[in-house]
Image (cartoon, grey):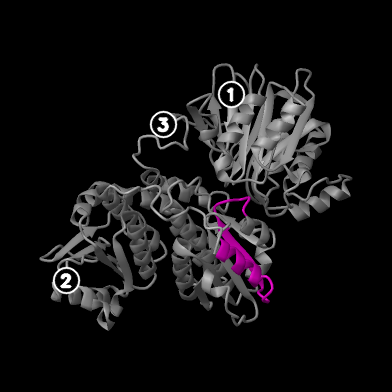
């Protein structure tokens, strides 16, 4: 996820810009740059490929200074990671711009600009915006008006910050589908794509709304809404800690990361969804052409990512009506799969460096697949660099070894893939709107579900001295049961197994007794009555059941059964994420009671770069 920082001040803006970029490093990026207007109003720019440290080294070697400036960390969507593709981009007249998002009509705009005599130094969609702003400035010196005219021509999602030698005392912002905030100081103001970038200099923020265009000066802020009417945005005090990557009030990183999931999911959706539609280009500039041809999907992943893939393959078949399968990458890479024509190959990884999944991707590129898509949390990883299409999960740093927010953001990203494929397979705008609406509801639903924390903390005492547990689910919730069992094994060292509930009678039922707790997830779907029958088999053998149930299932606690009602109702697409949350909390609180090392469990590593 790209990062934007801007400053309008009397002091040198460069140190503030650089600190802001450092605080946005968690988003992932492949290049960085800064542009400032010096004392005489002249534009100076420095850009580098790689980490923010490389940019800082370049500035140390050749310093620049100015009281107004913009800076950016980029994750490539148009053009490979090179210095010439890095932001800020410039046009004639000392215009500099940074941009988050995707401009879908950039090719048509580029063609028109070439006819007007503009030349291009980069492969990006952003340079198109810079030249359009200059074009609109030819008839007027009003930068604010020129930006407003330009954004009216853009199709897609964007957050823009623009500076210009012709008006050296302001930064102009625009927003559509991508977040941008204004930080309020004393005789100085700031802009950023995330409040975390500005916490060292202010805690007071104004959040622009969709369609807003703002002019930010040292002592004034002017905002026009999407209709061109003057707008006033509420000033809010941030409650985020100054260092968002510290544990803060949480006892462990894992608990912090569990509670970060509403924000992480929201960030995963940002810039990819505008209105009621999903932007195909969020997966890369070639995505639309690829998705239109897909006739089957193969997914390869390991561990938690494999469980996410199992959920996705279910919905790709059920919603998109495309054949789909998910395989363990370490097994897939050592066999010779049959690849049917126009099959999309998808890899899923938190780190993007998982050795078996990376090898599967490399094998797939030689196997005749239509295209490759990687869903990942690290922009500069090998899988991201080597895959043709990419969707970053934007979970931010996940310090705890046991994956939590990476899993739910993977499911969110895969939900977007389901929408993209359904849009092309089913050709239904109404269907797309319904699915997108369900995805956009997720952050709020997750936040409400996390209020189960105290209930689950008390429930964990029942498990702390057990040595084994069974987890049950049906349909896509079977994979969620598998993830719940994995979490329990990873951090509490209690042996746990997961089964499709109907499989109990085919062997595992022999294990059930009063010392074997059985955890079940019960959404309100077409398999509910079947699941209830499966759970009766457990009760009849004296097993103790703990059922996380949708509030509309009608299930109640009884002898041998503890029913934990979920705080929210969830659709089929939402249910895997919602029911994953109590599985995470249960494993966490059991591990705390057992006194294990929650964040760094024995024998495990965060990124597996060996087979």
Q: Which residues are magenta?
A: 355-381
Assign the C terminus to one quadrant of the image.
Answer: bottom right
- Mark 3 to mark 1: distance in Å? 19 Å
- What residue sits 43% from the left and 31% below the top? 241
| Numbered mark located on residue 189 in the image | 1
Q: Gap in Å between the C-alphas at discs 3 and 2? A: 48 Å
- 530 over 270 or under it: above or below: below
State which mark lies toward you, 2 or 1.
Answer: 2
Q: In x, y percent, where is residue 482?
A: 37, 66
Give the image quarter of residue 212.
top right
Q: Label 1's element?
A: strand
Q: Nearer the viewer, residue 604 or 83?
A: 604
Task: Look at mark 3 in the image and give the residue it sits on.
Answer: 239
Disc 3 secondary structure class: loop
For the point 76% across and 28% down, which residue is it?
61
Direction from residue 597 to residue 136 in the image, left or right = right
The answer to whether residue 436 of the structure is visible from this angle is: yes
Q: What is the C-alpha distance between the residues marked 2 and 1?
A: 65 Å
Q: Position of residue 131 (x, y in %)?
A: 79, 41
Counting residues from the start of the chain, the first of labels 3 and 2 encountered is 3
Q: Which residue is mark 2?
A: 513
Callout 3 environment at 10 Å: few (<14), some (14 to 19), or many (20+)? few
Tell me what residue is drawn at x 26 percent, y 77 percent. Answer: 508
- Side of 352 relative to 103 (left or right): left
Crowd rating for badge 2 (residues with CA inside 10 Å; few <14, some 14–19, many 20+) = some
């Amino acid at each position: 996820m790209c990062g934007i920082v801007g400053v309008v001040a009397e002091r040198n803006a460069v140190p503030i810009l650089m600190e802001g970029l450092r605080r946005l490093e968690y988003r992932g990026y492949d290049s960085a740059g800064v542009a400032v207007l010096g004392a005489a109003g002249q534009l100076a720019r420095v850009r580098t490929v790689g980490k923010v440290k490389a940019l800082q080294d370049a500035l140390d070697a050749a310093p620049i200074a100015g009281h107004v400036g913009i800076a950016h960390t980029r994750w490539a969507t148009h053009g490979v990671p090179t210095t010439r593709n890095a932001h800020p981009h410039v046009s004639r007249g000392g215009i500099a711009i940074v941009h988050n998002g995707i401009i879908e009509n950039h090719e048509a705009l580029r063609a028109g600009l070439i006819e007007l005599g503009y030349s291009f130094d980069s492969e990006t969609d952003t340079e198109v915006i810079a030249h359009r702003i200059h074009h609109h400035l030819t008839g007027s010196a009003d930068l604010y008006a020129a930006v407003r005219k330009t954004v009216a021509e853009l199709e897609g999602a964007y957050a823009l910050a623009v500076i210009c030698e012709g008006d050296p005392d302001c930064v102009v912002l625009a927003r559509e589908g991508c977040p941008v905030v204004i930080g309020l100081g004393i005789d100085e103001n700031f802009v950023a794509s995330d409040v975390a970038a500005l916490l060292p200099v202010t805690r007071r923020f104004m959040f622009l709304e969709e369609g807003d265009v703002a002019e930010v000066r040292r002592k004034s802020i002017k905002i026009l809404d999407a209709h061109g009417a003057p707008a006033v945005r509420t000033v809010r005090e941030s409650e985020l800690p100054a260092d968002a990557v510290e544990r803060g009030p949480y006892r462990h990183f894992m608990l912090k990361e569990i509670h970060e999931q509403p924000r992480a999911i929201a960030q995963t959706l940002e810039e990819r969804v505008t209105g009621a539609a999903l932007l195909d280009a969020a997966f890369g500039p070639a995505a639309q052409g690829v998705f239109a041809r897909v006739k089957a999907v193969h997914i390869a992943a390991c561990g938690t990512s494999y469980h996410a893939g199992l959920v996705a393959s279910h919905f790709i078949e059920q919603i998109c009506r495309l054949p789909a399968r998910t395989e363990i990458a370490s097994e897939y890479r050592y066999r010779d799969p049959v690849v049917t024509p126009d099959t999309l190959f998808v890899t899923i990884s938190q780190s993007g460096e998982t050795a078996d999944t990376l090898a599967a991707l490399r094998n797939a590129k030689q196997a005749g697949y239509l295209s490759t898509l990687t869903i990942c949390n690290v922009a500069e990883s090998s899988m991201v660099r080597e895959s043709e299409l990419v969707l970053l999960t934007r979970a931010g740093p996940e310090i705890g070894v046991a994956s939590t927010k990476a899993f739910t953001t993977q499911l969110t990203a895969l939900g977007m893939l389901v929408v993209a494929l359904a849009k092309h397979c089913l050709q239904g705008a109404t269907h797309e709107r319904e699915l997108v609406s369900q995805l956009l509801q997720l952050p709020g639903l997750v936040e409400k579900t996390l209020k189960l924390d105290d209930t689950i903390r008390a429930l964990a005492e029942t498990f702390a001295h057990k040595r084994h547990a069974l987890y049950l689910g049906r349909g896509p919730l079977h994979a969620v049961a598998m993830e719940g069992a994995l979490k329990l094994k990873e951090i509490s060292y209690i042996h746990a197994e997961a089964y499709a509930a109907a499989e109990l009678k085919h062997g595992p039922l022999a294990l059930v007794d009063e010392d074997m707790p059985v955890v079940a997830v019960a959404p309100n779907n077409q398999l509910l009555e079947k699941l209830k029958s499966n759970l009766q088999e457990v009760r009849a053998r004296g097993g103790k059941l703990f059922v996380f149930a949708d509030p509309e299932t009608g299930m109640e606690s009884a002898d041998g059964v503890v029913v934990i009602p979920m705080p929210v109702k969830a659709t089929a697409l939402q249910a895997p994420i919602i029911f994953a949350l109590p599985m995470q909390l249960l494993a966490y609180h059991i591990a705390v009671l057992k006194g294990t090392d929650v964040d760094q469990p024995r024998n495990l590593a965060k990124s597996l770069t060996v087979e």
